[in-house]
Amino acid sequence: MKYLKFKKILNPAFFVLGMLLAGVLLFELNFSFLDPIRMASEKVKFSDIYFSQLNGEAIKADDRIVIIDVGDTMKRPNIVNVLYKLKDLKYKVLAIDLNFAKINDEDQYTDSLLIAFANNSPNTIFAFDEFNEGSFFFSANKKIKKGIVNLGKEKEDHPVRAILNRSEKYPESHSFAYEIVKSFNPELTSLAELKNKEKIDINYQKKVLPITITTEDFLKNEESNISTFLDDKIVIVGSLRDEKNDIHLVPNAGYASFESRNKIYTQLQGPYIHAIAISMLLDEKVINKSPIFNWIVFSIIFIATLLLTLHWGHKYHLYMRLISRIYILLGSLLLFILYIFLMKFVLFEFPVSGAILTLILTHELTEIYEPTIAILKKIKLPLQNII
């Protein structure tokens, strides 16, 4: 008797689980007819909506980080002038978000100054792209500190949700933000946890932006107010006006300077995105994830939905259809609330869309189990007669 009861649960469970796994397999095999679904799921995520619409904090300035904006037309001699003026100041970490790709044969003197600066600036981090060789002086001195500036975008038109932290091509280096924070405060416990992570998710929940100074203001300033202001700070030298190559979508429209409550995304320059990541790492506000937790949640949803749907199916009543729909709606709402609660108070993220999909599909597949078996039995009998 117990075996029959167990079998009544086990058979539908294998059926539903098999159908769910088949669906996942179809999705992973990259069939072209699934491309629209895949593209939509990659381009828009619930975390984007959470950061942009469910998080009402105003933008705050993080005075630990200062960006000196060199624009998009500044020549190398002027940039070197900025670097040497900075060299004498008491900053904590200097980060150069610029790429000096080629030697300038027409101005070897400036390049020699640049090489000397790179070789004699221990608290300086230079940016480099994993897809090119970086600045021309990197190969001559392996001790120059470098950080990967690549952003963790799935595709070019997708929003930036992460920074690339490890590269197979350059395994000795970490992300630009990670290297800066490690130089600024090497005692942070989160650095050891993030050391081997390929990507670090950016927490856009705390809306912060660095203080910005133009190079014109910095160079013409003869008084000590700007100079002393940079004491013990992270100073990033980069361009905020390169709107062709270094501007990206981010999943929080609250960073826009205009009113954007009805939008999810806005555009930010690369140095701003790195500054947001640096601020997040300094405050140890890193988003946590756990595949084990995800599987536990999915398993609980699967088992609970399977048992309840079988129970409702065996005791069919006029109102059971309504009850099952209320269960789906309430279950989805509770998963949304759980996501918001974990993100807001624990900084823990789980795939809420996958959890809701598991809830809906388990319910629907369990409901069609008995009709499917009945149809298969009717088909089987004529086949047996023919054989």
Image (cartoon, rainbow, N blue to C red):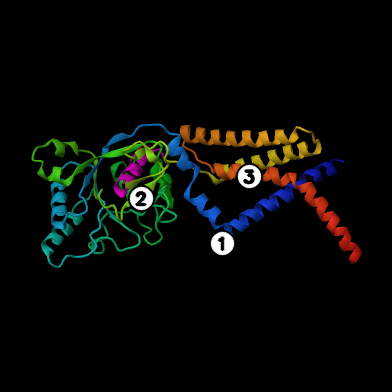
SS assignment at label 2: strand
Neighbours of disc 2 within 10 Å: few (<14), some (14-19), many (20+): many
Q: Residue 338: image x %, image y %?
A: 55, 34
Task: Report the span colored magenta.
Answer: 269-285
Q: Position of residue 143 (x, y in %)?
A: 26, 57
Type of the residue with mark 1: Ser
Q: Amino acid at mark 2?
A: His
Task: Quadrant for the C terminus, please.
Answer: bottom right
Q: CA distance from mark 2 to mark 1?
A: 28 Å
The disc label shown at residue 248, or none: 2
Label 2, label 3: how many angstroms apart (C-alpha)?
33 Å
Viewer-side residue, 255 vs 93:
255
In the rendered image of this protein, does residue 106 appear above or below residue 350? below
Q: Which residue is mark 1?
A: 32
Residue at 45% over, 42% down: 48
Q: Amino acid at mark 3?
A: Thr
Q: Which badge, 3 or 1, comes first in the chain's sequence?
A: 1
Q: Is residue 319 magenta?
A: no
The residue under label 3 is 358
Residue 38: percent from left, percent from top: 53, 54
